[in-house]
């Protein structure tokens, strides 16, 4: 089937009686070698931006666990975030650099996820009569899980960064009390715990996927990559959920 | 054996299709799935009805023409081609759904026959070597490392059937394309086009309207030739490398 012109190859796999009904299907658009127009290029953007967010989450969970060492240490840590990089960096510059990088990562991730998802759905419009679940739960929930995470990020910032939707009096510079306020409401706990389960699932498939997308995965590294993905997912989910559980049980008060 | 078949019938690419039910009797467990369909077609012809159109050629698992989704599985419940699937894999009285490959890039031509020329155009975009190879050369003329030879051979097993696309929830052709790219890219004979091959074949694959890869792994599970999922990561690596090297 290799080198014949496409008009002839059209018949190679169609039985003779149906040949006239099948004009060779033309490609849907002109091929492009460009990075962003390629599905692999978009997926690379998704992988790199996902890994940037993942690195942030690892730092974030470590910081959050300081809540178990009391208000002084936790609030002190929040203060340090504002002076990190000093005296080279001006007050809050380090924090703003991180915020801008993260915002860019979320944007790039969401745009590539949206564009690829639309393309994927268009590429396979018809379902089979008998549906079979051929992949893992984490794999099948990447899109909905991602949407949940996107909504969570918005709520989370409005709750604990700007204080816009914070329950009780939000006090800047007093994150210890703010955290207790949020996790003293049933909905605060519910939203947060659901989102953290979503993070775990997303990272479980996402980390391993990113390794494949970036060409790091191979048969030999399969076990170690799966182990790392599951380990990261577990540490993130358990670490984040420990905080509301701590507040609910009165360990943090 | 007796089977209750539900088969996709569609007059031509423009027509609406639907599942039609047929009872097929007198099936031997030693028949292949295609022989079972032959039995049905003989009966349909005797009755003066239009026989069910399906693709087939070698009927020995090497050409890649046969292409049926059976009970939701590309090539059916065993890891083999439809022509090498035998009726002993089913039980008397079973209801069996038979559908064509489903993907926008593989439009239905008639009944169970789909147009897979998109694969041909992916091959034309780079699935060849330009080095004149002539007749089979002396085996040691071009030394090939054992690992590379094994890898090339593993990927050369792809028969271009398209089961990977049919099984993929995104209708992605990454497994097929990776088999073809890796097959030639690991060999010294394929080295002159190493970069352009992967860039052009991936560009053609995308232009054909196949979906992107979300690494569900359903392609590798369906592949009758055992092309493994890590082949996709290997192609991604080649693509990223080529992007850096080619302006
Ligand atoms: C704005 C919210 C988010 C959306 C809409 C989203 C959506 C998605 C989607 C649709 C995929 C592709 C799934 C697939 O290929 O099967 C994906 C992959 C990924 N996501 Fe997210 N996600 C979001 C947030 C996050 C966060 C917070 C992280 C950080 C841990 C993350 C890390 C990853 C990684 C590492 C991948 C793998 C990239 C690859 O497949 O190569 N995502 N995301
Ligand atoms: S990779 Fe496997 S399933 Fe896909 S076309 Fe080749 S042989 Fe068929
Ligand atoms: S008919 Fe050739 S592989 Fe099935």
Image (tube, coloured by chain):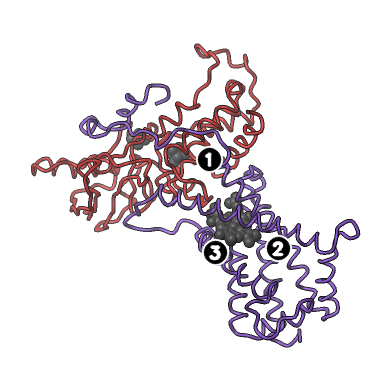
- Chain letter, disc 1 residue: A
Q: Is residue A220 left or right of residue B229?
A: right
As drawn, B130 above or below B149? above
Where is residue B47, by image quadrant? Answer: top left
Q: Is mark 1 within 8 Å of ligand 1?
A: no
Give the residue drawn at x 55%, y 67%: A148
Between A18 and B121, the residue placed more toward the observer is B121
Mark 3–mark 2 Cα distance, whole angstroms, equals: 16 Å
Which chain did the image draw in red? B
- Chain letter, disc 3 residue: A
Name the mark nearer the viewer: 3 or 1.
Answer: 1
Give the residue drawn at x 53%, y 14%: B133
Q: Is mark 2 within 8 Å of ligand 1?
A: yes
Mark 3–mark 1 Cα distance, whole angstroms, equals: 25 Å
As drawn, A166 above or below A92? below
Q: Crowding at label 3, few (<14), some or many (≥20) Cα neighbours within 10 Å?
A: many
Badge 1 is on which residue? Answer: A37
* Image location (x, y in percent) of residue A180: 72, 83
Q: Is residue B104 left or right of residue A17?
A: right
Badge 3 is on which residue? Answer: A145
Badge 2 is on which residue? Answer: A57
Which mark is first along the chain, 2 or 3? 2
The answer to whether tags 1 and 2 share a subunit is yes
């Amino acid at each position: 089937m290799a080198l014949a012109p496409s008009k002839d190859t059209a018949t190679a796999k169609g039985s003779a009686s149906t040949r006239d009904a099948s004009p060779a299907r033309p490609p849907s658009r002109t091929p492009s070698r460009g990075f962003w127009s390629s599905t692999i290029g978009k997926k690379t953007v998704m992988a790199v931006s996902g890994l940037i967010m993942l690195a942030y989450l690892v730092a974030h969970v470590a910081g959050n666990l300081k809540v178990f060492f009391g208000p002084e240490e936790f609030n002190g840590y929040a203060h340090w975030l504002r002076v990190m990089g000093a005296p080279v960096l001006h007050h809050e510059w380090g924090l703003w650099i991180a915020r801008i990088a993260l915002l860019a990562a979320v944007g790039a991730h969401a745009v590539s996820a949206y564009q690829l998802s639309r393309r994927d759905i268009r590429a396979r419009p018809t379902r089979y009569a008998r549906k079979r679940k051929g992949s893992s739960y984490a794999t099948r929930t990447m899109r909905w899980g991602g949407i949940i995470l996107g909504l969570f990020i918005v709520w989370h910032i409005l709750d604990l960064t700007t204080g816009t939707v914070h329950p009780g009096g939000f006090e800047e510079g007093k994150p210890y009390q703010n955290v207790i306020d949020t996790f003293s409401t049933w909905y605060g706990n519910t939203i947060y715990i659901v989102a953290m389960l979503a993070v775990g699932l997303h990272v479980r498939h996402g980390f391993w996927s990113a390794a494949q997308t970036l060409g790091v995965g191979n048969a030999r590294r399969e076990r170690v990559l799966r182990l790392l993905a599951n380990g990261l997912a577990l540490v993130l989910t358990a670490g984040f959920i420990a905080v509301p559980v701590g507040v609910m049980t009165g360990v943090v008060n | 054996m007796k089977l209750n078949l539900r088969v996709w019938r569609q007059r031509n690419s423009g027509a609406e299709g639907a599942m039609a039910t047929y009872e097929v009797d007198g099936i031997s467990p030693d028949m292949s799935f295609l022989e079972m369909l032959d039995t049905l077609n003989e009966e349909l012809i005797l009755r003066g009805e239009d026989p069910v159109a399906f693709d087939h050629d070698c009927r020995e698992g090497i050409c890649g023409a046969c292409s049926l989704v059976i009970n939701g599985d590309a090539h059916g419940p065993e890891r083999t081609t439809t022509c090498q699937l035998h009726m002993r894999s089913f039980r008397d009285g079973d209801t069996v759904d038979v559908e064509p490959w489903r993907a926008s890039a593989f439009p239905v031509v008639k009944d169970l026959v789909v147009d897979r020329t998109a694969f041909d155009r992916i091959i034309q975009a780079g699935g060849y070597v330009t080095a004149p190879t002539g007749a089979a050369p002396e085996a040691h003329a071009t030394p090939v490392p054992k690992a590379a030879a094994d890898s090339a051979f593993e990927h050369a097993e792809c028969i271009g059937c398209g089961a990977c696309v049919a099984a993929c929830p995104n209708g992605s052709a990454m497994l097929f394309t990776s088999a073809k790219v890796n097959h030639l890219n690991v060999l010294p004979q394929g080295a002159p086009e190493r970069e352009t091959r992967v860039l052009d074949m991936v560009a053609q694959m995308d232009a054909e309207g196949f979906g992107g890869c979300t690494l569900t792994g359903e392609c590798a599970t369906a592949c009758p030739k055992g092309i493994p999922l890590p082949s996709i990561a290997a192609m991604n690596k080649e693509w990223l490398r080529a992007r850096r090297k080619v302006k």
